[in-house]
Image (cartoon, coloured by chain):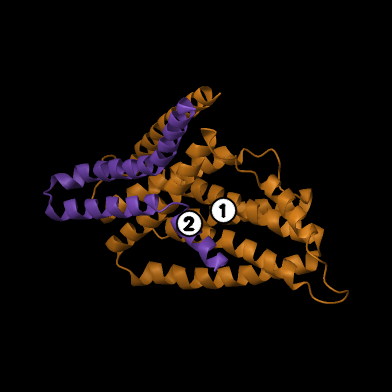
Chain colours: A orange, B purple
């Protein structure tokens, strides 16, 4: 149970974040030069690898297990509840839907207005945009995978999920040369929010001495509780929004 | 500065209410854990789940308040 949920959570979180990074890398490559876009991406990947090497061993070997579970739970709750909050607002129609393809188009339009570099010179603006885009999306990926992988038996599914997702996103980039426009990103991000929040509550409670009834099966009823609560919140916010609009018109 | 702001947004999220709510929820849970008896082992998880759900609901409460004030100002017009 925990293996499958960790794998799904890691794969979805990494895949969705990397799709956003892909939108920036492709936009920079198509609008400027792919060489500069890929150099910026390589720089960010090196910085992220260094962060992962530092963060992973520190978390896994230096911090005692019980406090570690609370820290991991806190991080997962921070990410999970934030993804869930945005998901509720998007599904209730109070926030624009998540769309990597739209970001790709907007990024290209913004880059089009930047003056090109002199011929034969390095395009530092393009490199910096690709570097920053990949770094910012990648930091969240590193933190989520590290947190999911830090629990006993969690490293393998977290890494497998992450690697499969990165390979899939690179494949999409190589084949399609643009982010997929029909991916249900809003619903997928909502799912990631539920999965990460579930693990967050599960780990933090274990770190505080809780023994969940049903052991790993608790993941199922915690997830169900988050789904029911968030669906209720979506219904209430949608209803209030419709009422406010009806009164205003 | 802008990158630092973006990093803060990535780690803590877009609002202050959610990270504060999570911090308070974990603080309350840790406090109860210290003073509670054996019942905490069985029931503590559900208390933390309730506190996390409350933190999420409060962070979304701002949206509901904004709608309510929108409705009131529209009715006045």
Question: Residue B39: percent from the left, percent from the top?
Answer: 14, 44
Of the image marks 1 and 2, the number of the one nearer the N terminus: 1
Which residue ends up furthest to the front in the rendered image? B77
- Residue under pointer 2: A144
Query: Mark 1 and 2 residues: CB-CB less than 8 Å, in contact?
Result: yes
Residue nearest the observer in this picture, B50 or B12: B12
Q: Does dot 2 land on a helix, a strand or a loop?
A: helix
Q: Chain of mark 2?
A: A
Write down the quadrant of residue A212 in the picture.
top left
Q: Residue at x 44, y 57 (%)?
A: B12
The CA distance from mark 1 to mark 2 is 8 Å
Quadrant in which the N terminus of chain A is drawn: top left
Residue nearest the observer in this picture, A97 or A229: A97
Quadrant in which the C terminus of chain A is drawn: top right
Residue A14 has which mark? 1
Image-based side of B39 in relation to B73, left or right = left
Q: Does dot 1 land on a helix, a strand or a loop?
A: helix
């Amino acid at each position: 149970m925990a293996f499958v949920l960790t794998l799904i959570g890691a794969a979805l979180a990494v895949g969705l974040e990397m799709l956003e990074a892909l939108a920036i890398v492709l936009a920079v490559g198509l609008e400027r030069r792919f060489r500069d876009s890929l150099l910026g991406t390589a720089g960010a990947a090196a910085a992220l690898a260094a962060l992962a090497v530092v963060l992973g061993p520190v978390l896994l070997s230096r911090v005692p297990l019980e406090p570690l579970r609370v820290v991991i739970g806190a991080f997962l709750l921070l990410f999970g509840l934030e993804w869930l909050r945005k998901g509720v607002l998007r599904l209730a129609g109070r926030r624009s839907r998540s769309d990597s393809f739209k970001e790709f188009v907007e990024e290209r339009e913004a880059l089009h207005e930047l003056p090109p570099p002199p011929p034969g010179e390095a395009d530092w603006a393009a490199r910096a945009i690709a570097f920053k885009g990949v770094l910012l999306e990648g930091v969240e990926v590193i933190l989520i995978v590290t947190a999911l992988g830090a629990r006993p038996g969690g490293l393998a599914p977290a890494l497998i999920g992450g690697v499969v997702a990165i390979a899939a996103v690179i494949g999409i980039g190589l084949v399609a040369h643009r982010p997929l426009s029909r991916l249900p990103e809003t619903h997928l991000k909502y799912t990631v929010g539920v999965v990460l929040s579930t693990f967050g509550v599960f780990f933090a409670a274990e770190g505080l001495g809780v023994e969940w009834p049903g052991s790993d099966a608790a993941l199922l009823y915690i997830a169900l509780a988050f789904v029911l609560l968030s669906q209720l919140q979506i219904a209430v916010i949608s209803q209030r929004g419709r009422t406010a609009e009806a009164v205003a018109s | 500065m802008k990158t630092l702001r973006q990093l803060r947004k990535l780690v803590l999220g877009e609002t202050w209410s959610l990270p504060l709510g999570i911090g308070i929820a974990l603080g309350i849970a840790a406090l109860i854990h210290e003073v509670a008896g054996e019942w905490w082992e069985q029931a503590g998880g559900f208390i933390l789940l309730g506190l996390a759900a409350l933190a999420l609901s409060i962070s979304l409460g701002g949206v509901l308040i904004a709608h309510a004030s929108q409705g009131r100002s529209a009715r006045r017009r």
